[in-house]
Amino acid sequence: MQSGPPPLVGFNNNVRYRGMRFHIQTEDSGVTKPHIITHLFADGGRVIKSLRTDYAEYGGAPMLGVDGVALVCHGRSNGRAIENAIRVAVKSARAGLGTETTAAMARNAFLWAPPAAAAPQAAGAPS
């Protein structure tokens, strides 16, 4: 049994990085649970990075998979929340949030490597 309403639809996108495909999903849990959850998926559904951000305190949540730093702000954000979102965006950029995401993708690159090609067999060799 679910304890509350399901998360609201958020940002969902597939991202290619060095020939690999990742899925980014950001969900807003709504006003009753004021936080935004962002997941970076690999290997067909394995979560390799997650961020949970309380938008009431920070003003927004970082969007993974964007080249640079971007924050999602709640639709009911007030001026203080927007100010906090700008502050968090600046701090995230200075902390290298985009670099960390890129590193997480690179660490999991082996998941998308194509299988090694089979060596050709010599004529008359048993298969």
Image (spheres, rainbow, N blue to C red):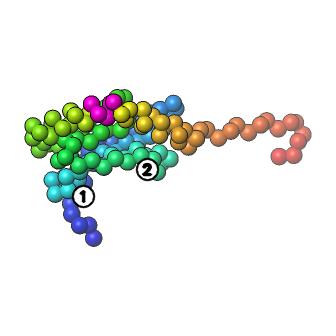
Numbered mark located on residue 115 in the image: none
Q: Secondary structure at mark 2?
A: strand
Does residue 115 appear to the left or right of 27 in the view shown?
Answer: right
Say which residue label 2 marks: 47
Q: Earlier in the sequence, mark 1 or mark 2?
A: 1
Percent across and percent down for residue 65 are 37, 36
Q: What residue is at 21 percent from the left and 60 percent from the top?
A: 5
Numbered circle sitting on residue 6:
1
> Looking at the image, how many numbered discs can be counted on the residues?
2
Give the main secondary structure of the magenta stretch: helix
Q: Is residue 92 magenta?
A: yes
Q: Is residue 23 visible?
A: yes
Tell me the quarter of the picture where residue 97 sits: top left
Q: Is residue 30 above or below residue 83?
A: below
Q: Nearer the viewer, residue 112 or 34?
A: 34
Q: What residue is rendered at 30% in x and 49% in y?
A: 52
Which quarter of the image is occupied by the N terminus? bottom left
Q: Name the image quarter holding residue 64.
A: top left
User: Closest to the observer: 78 or 21?
Assistant: 78
Q: Which residues are magenta?
A: 90-94
The residue depicted at 48 percent of the width and 36 percent of the height is: 103
Q: Is residue 104 above or below residue 35?
A: above
User: Is the Cβ of the residue at disc 1 closer than 8 Å to that at disc 2?
Assistant: no
Q: Write the residue at 20% across / 37% down.
A: 85
What residue type is disc 1 on? Pro
Separation of disc 1 and disc 2 at Cα? 19 Å
Residue 73: horizontal and vertical position, in percent? 20, 40
Q: Secondary structure at mark 1?
A: loop
**Amino acid carrying mark 2 in the image:** Val
Residue 58 drawn at (x, y percent): 21, 43
Residue 13 drawn at (x, y percent): 35, 39
Q: In the image, 85: left or right of 68? A: left
